[in-house]
Amino acid sequence: MFTASRPFLVFDYFRVPYDVPSPPAPDRGTGPYWARLTSGRRGGGPSLSWPVFPTGGSFPGRRARRFWIGDLVLHGTLATTAELLEPLSTGAQNWIPDERLFADDGKVLGAVWRSGDGSLALPFDPAEVVTRFWTERYADTHASDARRWARQEALRAYYGVRPVLPRTVQISLRRAGSHVQRRRSFPRWPVEDSLHGFFDLVMRWASSVAGMRVPWIAPWPAGHTWALVLTHDVETEAGLHRIPTLQEVDRRAGHRSAWNLVPGRYRVEDALVSSLQEGGDEVGIHGLYHDGRDLHPDELPRRMPQIRHWAERWGAVGFRSPATHRDWAVMSMLPFQYDSSSPDTDPFEPQAGGCCSWLPYCNGPIVELPITMPQDHTLFAILRARDGRLWTDKAERIRARGGMALLITHPDYTEVGPMVAAYEQLLAHFAADPDVWRALPGEVAAWWRRRAASSLEWDGAAWRVVGPAAGEAAVAFTDRPAARRDDARTCNLPRTGRADRPTPQPTPPRRGDSRAC
């Protein structure tokens, strides 16, 4: 359906069929070179162009920055207007600004340009924009080296003094700081949908270039339109003894869940692990000692043998870092099938921020399952919420967008405010939903790998899924391209049609790149 001059990450992620006929040119020089996506293998008709920058998205004298398209807050390296238009000036088409890019202060930074034949030229690399969300490297675009160093030192100081502070003092300090933390401008809390809005926008651009609806592999199997994933972090021995409280709530609601245990902090009987697994639940590793040092580059090599030992002993395939501490490079080396330490947005954790994603994505060999719901401790201990309305509202938002509502609750905090009642309320709210996938995190990670290893092929009459996800995956389509440009804020990718036939293609496309995982 499409031909690209180099791999296109957004298409790889959504499993849109496209072809890269030859190896991409190597990164060279001090300025961007240009990638091109065309509809059809013959290369005719409108195209989508974007800059590819050397050295992974930046080069001396130019830094990535924050910019806005409509309500979307994005981060990336921007080509100048002169750099953008120079390679386009050789053609006969006239180019005009189509979507403007703005700075925080309202200054115009550039534009997406459109030609008379419907071609589009972007001043940024969509892959860089997406990866800055996933890796949380957007913080690098508006923070000085001194501020980044100060954040790292503050995090180390927090873990240094935390063991000696009484619990009441910890809570008081966090409550005092929450008034400032919740005003964080990015990622916005409790909902930051810029990443998914950007996905919508790129897919709308692709549909416009193609002049037809674009097919992709739907994110969930067996006809499900969204996922609800329950996890419980057991932080202390007291929490270990309270497992039955939350276990009973799950059972009554017909859910299974994952229990993340800390093997070096309290004694865990193998019989308990076996009992949880025999009941259909999953067991994961929640750090070795829950001291925030598991991912430290100097400490991880010393702890890795013990972490691996407990993972093998318990058959654990998942990991969650204590206090959701994150290090993108280090976490890709963990001996697990998935990690679930990155929130979509959370200003209240010691390492504030988030990946802004409501869908899984891959960090090397590991599938990352974002924590997309506010934590129970945040809501009921820090913010002192009186009910679970925020949980229900956020889950409804994720459901409408076809995402994954992944929740952490702690048996340690079952006596904090109305936590248990709010948890029961959340599960009851979606009890009759026929479209939800009530999956274990390990099942979600395994599915995401199968989906990433599958592709779409045209069989002469319709698109079909081939590969490991065949038989359980659905084909989805973007909305039909509008006759004229709509505002970027109106598009909504998850509200797409499914399984209806697109306009027949003249030739069957080869599989696109499968490096989405």
Image (cartoon, rainbow, N blue to C red):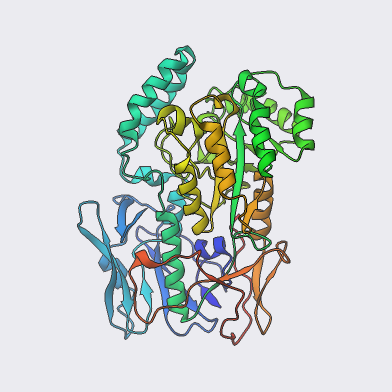
> What residue is shown at x 30% (from left), y 52% (from top)?
62
Give the x, y percent position of residue 175: 37, 26
Q: Nearer the viewer, residue 288 or 484?
A: 484
> What residue is shown at x 61% (from left), y 41% (from top)?
230
| Quadrant of the rendered image containing residue 103 | bottom left
In the rendered view, tell whether residue 476 sits above or below residue 435: below
> What residue is shown at x 70% (from left), y 62% (from top)?
469
* Quarter containing the N terminus: bottom right
In the rendered view, tell whether residue 472 sits above or below residue 121: above
Residue 36 in sight: no
In the rendered view, tell whether residue 147 sits above or below residue 4: above
| Quadrant of the rendered image containing residue 125 | bottom left
Using residue 283 as the reference point, say whether residue 129 is left or right of it.
left
Give the x, y percent position of residue 26: 49, 62
Residue 487 in sight: yes
| Quadrant of the rendered image containing residue 308 | top right
